[in-house]
Image (cartoon, rainbow, N blue to C red):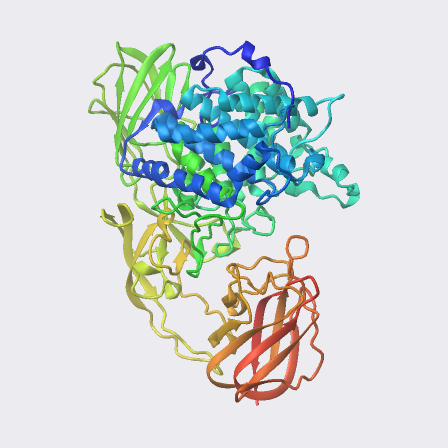
Amino acid sequence: MKTMGCFWAVGFAGIIAFIAPAVGTAQGTLAKLRTVPFTDVKIADAFWSPRQETNRIASIPVNLENLEKAGNLENFRLAAKGAREGYQGPVFMDSDAYKALEAASYSLATHPDPALEKQLDEIIATLAAAQQPDGYLNTYFIVKEPSKRWTNLRDWHELYCAGHLFEAAVAHFQATGKRNFLNVAVKLADNIDSVFGLPPKRMGYSGHPEIELALIKLWRVTGERRYFELARFFVENRGRKFFAGEHNTPLDRYDGSYWQDDVPIYEHRNIKGHAVRAAYLMSGTTDVVAETGDERLLAMLNRVWRNTTERNMYVTGGIGPSAHNEGFTVDYDLPNATAYQETCATVALAQWGHRLALLHGDAKYADVVERALYNGVLAGVSQDGTKFFYVNPLDSAGRHHRQPWFGCACCPPNVARTLASLGGYAYAVSDDALWVNLYIQGSVKATIAGVPVELNVTTEYPWDGKVVLEPIVKQATSFELRLRSPAWCEAPSLSVNGRKISPLKTEQGYLVLKDKWKTGDKVELTLPMPIQRVAANPNVKANHGLLAIQRGPLVYCLEQCDQSEPVTAMFVPAGAELKPEKEKSLLGGVVTIKGMAEIAADHNWRRTLYQPANVSRRVPFKAIPYYAWDNREAGVMKVWLPTAPLVPRVGGLEAEAKVTMSFANDNCQPYGVNDGIEPKSSGEQPAANCHWWPHKGTEEWVQYTWSKPMTVSGVKVYWFDDTGRGQCRVPVSWQIQFLDGQSWKPVAAKGNYAAAKDKWCEVEFEPVQTAALRLVARLQDGWSAGVHEWKVIETDD
Ligand SMILES: [Zn+2]
């Protein structure tokens, strides 16, 4: 990844002159606004301050500890001492370390911490020692595959890792003024710049975008224009189907959409492929457009943003519904229980929205940033800062929990760096205006038309919509205050020094106040926060008949531990009265929402066709903010709530059975086999996955046990098969056995046991009366297997 170097030492003007925006960039000739760096924003509120503190004292140290345990840091040491074996983890391990270093650097910028600074310096010294003489740095290729540098840009994440190094180095330089990390970044960037570009350099771009936006940051902080040109090269050439050639894939069989490489970058009409890659790519493209003013690219960005936020975004501000590609499928496909909504993807969407907000000066982009930050991003970390979500469903059976770390640990440091630099999303400036995008108690310092200006903000946002803003200026100064009027707020109001402003002047979603401001002036913004019932576009099939609850920027959910009755049985009629209630001791202090839900009485439909419809009964319920779920006792969680009794899922005898397996590892959910969720294909990723991986070639079983004997005469099995991404295949053979006394005996099947993909494999047999059945499978040599659903047919004799 690099070569060259040295050049930058020439033109390094003072740190201050080159301080780049710490969050997002986008500020080029085209951008209407410039961000205010988070270092000029003081957050001093009851909502974000404790979270930033937890991030600083818990999450960041936990990140660094886990990077030590998982081998990320050891990989650098191995590379530094020239080792050729011992590398641990997947190919992109370096990137997780860089993101954590970035988070720690942001933290240093606002909270000087000599011990942390020393720890970072030691890690940076190791990175520098690992860096090759030509500037290349990637521990996987230095330690394990030295001959394979740059040979698989599609899959091996070298440029991606480099991008995260650049972001971290820029953050560290801005925080400390020290160049030790930035030197490493510059040498690596120069190496990459010597390899990639227009002929005689080579064509190529990263399978996982990220380096584009990172090079822009590096350009802004060093002033080295080549880095901008390299970012531009990566962006403008994307879609030349480079990966088809790299992997000898015939063009007529090449679908590059996963990598956003199916059409030239100018021609995208919708968001596609892997969600994090897509949103990072669009972020970098936005930065490039801000500088070049390229109208075609700008039109593409606007079009794809609309497609993303109008058809492909969860109400929690996350993107990417599907696990199979960690990304997008088709418009309006927003399932709740199987929502993938990777935490990193929500972070990436916030980054992109922030850049577009700067480019356009339109509040609708900051609205999305707010939605993402207060819901999807914040859910990514536990209240104590030590556990993390990678996948963020909007409906859980109670078995999805935050984890201390992941084999692929991209999300934890991504949340940490976002929280540590949160202030950077809050404000922006233009030539004659200070723009307020997020309402967070504290203060901001900015320079408008050459005049230093401060603004004090007092508010209990997001729990209350009253915001008091007080300018502090040396002498009376004319400028505009532009206050975002959130899309969720129907009736904002404003007063200045007690005088109500009417009519309000609104431009592109901002309330505009032009005045000659002096210290002592007081602006009072009121954003009424009635509880809202939110409906989804009817094209979102997953939400038919469902409504969500939102108050202010926060989306709510029902968690089982707050209810006296099963959440799965409750419905909340559209007209139900809902009331907010402040609960200071709950989950760090939240406003809950209380109301009356209803529960339809249970029916047992086994062998019946008609029954009296029992009257529903009313039960109290309590909703909490979505970001706060899974911090207490495990249980069912739902964001989207039915407004009428749900049609009960019709299950057979399997629904009443207890499930056990011959083997189940950590990420196997045996209950998936009888959860009644029917797949559309064997390759579909189930919300709960019943499989025997990593066992391969063995004989395995899954068992149903009933509390009393049942008479059964057939089964239907839908096999799981993740060809193309995993190691489960349809088994060689299978059979059904029943428990007869103490022994297992095969049933007398009336036909063959077919083992096929993408269909129900059905077998009838002579009826048996038994309290337990086993589905026994012989796995293919070298492959594992799994079962989507296994239904049991009760004899009708
Ligand atoms: Zn992630």
Q: Residue at x 68, y 21 (%)?
A: 194
Left or right of 287? Residue 554 is left
Residue 483, compared with residue 656, is above or below; it is above
x, y percent for residue 201: 73, 23
Left or right of 686? Residue 750 is right
Q: Residue at x 39, y 39 (%)?
A: 61
Left or right of 590? Residue 533 is right
Residue 514 shows up from this direction: yes
Please name whichever residue, 517 or 181, is drawn nearer the observer in this view of the structure.
181
Q: Residue at x 34, y 38 (%)?
A: 57
Residue 88, compared with residue 441, is above or below; it is below
Residue 351, compared with residue 200, is above or below; it is below
| Quadrant in the picture for the N terminus | top right
Residue 484 shows up from this direction: no
Q: Residue 150 falls in which quadrant of the image?
A: top right
x, y percent for residue 708: 46, 85
Q: How many marks?
A: 0
x, y percent for residue 244: 75, 39
x, y percent for residue 739: 55, 85
| Quadrant in the picture for the C terminus | bottom right
Please name whichever residue, 499 or 189, is drawn nearer the observer in this view of the structure.
189
